[in-house]
Image (tube, rainbow, N blue to C red):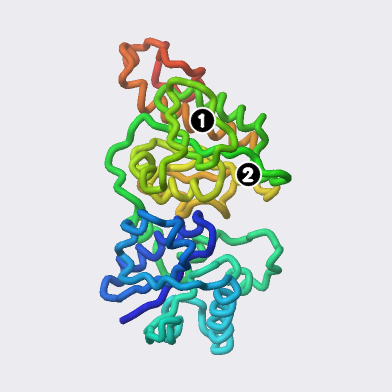
Amino acid sequence: MDWLVFDFGVNYGDNFRGFLFLKALKRKFPEIRMTCWITPALDRGLGGLRKFLAFLDRFLIRERSPKETYLLNFSILKRLLEENRKFSLENFPAGCGPDGNHYDKIIPNAEPWITAKWIRREALEAPDSVNQGEFLQEILNLSTEELNQAMPLFGRREKVDDLIAVGLCRPRERDRKQPSRKKIDQVWEILLKWPGRIAVLDFQEWYPPPRSPKIEDHRKKSWVEKVPLLNRASLFVGIDGGLNHFAAACGCPTLSFFGERHGTDWGEKVGPYPRETPFGEHLTVSNFDAFLLAADRRLKQLAKSKFLSSIPGSGRGIEPSIPWIFDSSLFSEVNP
């Protein structure tokens, strides 16, 4: 059995999230031979990460425009609707690929957001009302357990360090998804209270991190070089985007800010998917004040679990002497 699948478009984040679904699909059907059609641009961008995608039997590297992707997805969707059949794995048709080979199944997994809008009869410019991860899980007939068993996509998560990974970018002009410099500084005020190490992973040179001996600058490292860092990090804190999805693909729990222009307080419909994983939770927040509160709480909980046991006297009613103002509710078992 030969199946043809696709990359997930031009955005790195969509591909870091989407290839996990293909890995889970291959684990579910190990007998199939899976060919993935990816564009030359994505192939160059993935670089050394390709070694982690060995579950794909073959890469077909050819140009493919978004229009071609949309036409393919729409043709399959139209056919299934006319036949009153569900848009899902068991009904995807056989066909000929761009290489002239016959495939027993052509799976229209590329650009899932637009296919979801077609199915729901929504305008393309309408706000997203579906989580792309949920949609992919539905059309590929994968369970959450099967997705979790395929994690992480990159590397192995065996040992977790006292490391927090950070991906904060300087805002683009008139893009409310990116917080202002003032707001980024507010995030750093919270992050710098973390007792352990902080690894800055942004690729951009837009906004240098503050000076602190606990900050490690890994911004110029490649995707591949950042894999072991994120395999070991306790948490990734940053802006929703490619780096956030990359952290999740390395098995690192994430907390990300999605942008207030999207109008939801807690971003259940965005961010890495599944939200609950064996390695921790992925939480995406659209309200900046809620994001700050979530960051503060998450880091305090991590600091409590990681550092309290190593502080002399901490189990004998002595106030923990780490550089943090802890909520008393988080230390209910400690009697200072």
Q: Residue furthest bottom?
A: 83
Density class for disc 2 (Cα within 10 Å; few <14, some 14-19, many ≥20) is many
Report the mark closest to the observer, 2 or 1.
2
For the N terminus, the quadrant is: bottom left
Above or below, comparing residue 78 to residue 33 in the picture:
below
Residue 10 image-quadrant placement: bottom right
Q: Whole-percent x and y of residue 290?
A: 61, 36
- Residue 227 is labelled as none
- Give the residue drawn at x 30%, y 72%: 29
Q: What's the residue type where badge 1 is placed?
A: Arg
Q: Tags 2 and 1 in contact by the CB under 8 Å rule?
A: no
Q: Whole-percent x and y of residue 233?
A: 38, 37
**Image label count:** 2
Q: Whole-percent x and y of residue 207?
A: 59, 34
For the C terminus, the quadrant is: top left
Above or below, comparing residue 6 to residue 204 in the picture:
below
> 227 or 106, which is in the foreground?
227
Earlier in the chain: of badge 2 and badge 1, it is: 2
The residue under label 1 is 297
> 116 or 70, which is in the foreground?
70
Residue 328 visible, this angle: no
Give the distance between the C-alpha atoms of the residues marked 2 and 1, in whole angstroms: 17 Å
Q: What's the residue type where badge 2 is placed?
A: Ser
- Left or right of 135? Residue 336 is left
The residue under label 2 is 286
Residue 105 image-quadrant placement: bottom left
Q: Secondary structure at mark 1?
A: helix
Residue 201 visible, this angle: yes
Above or below, comparing residue 77 to residue 175 in the picture:
below
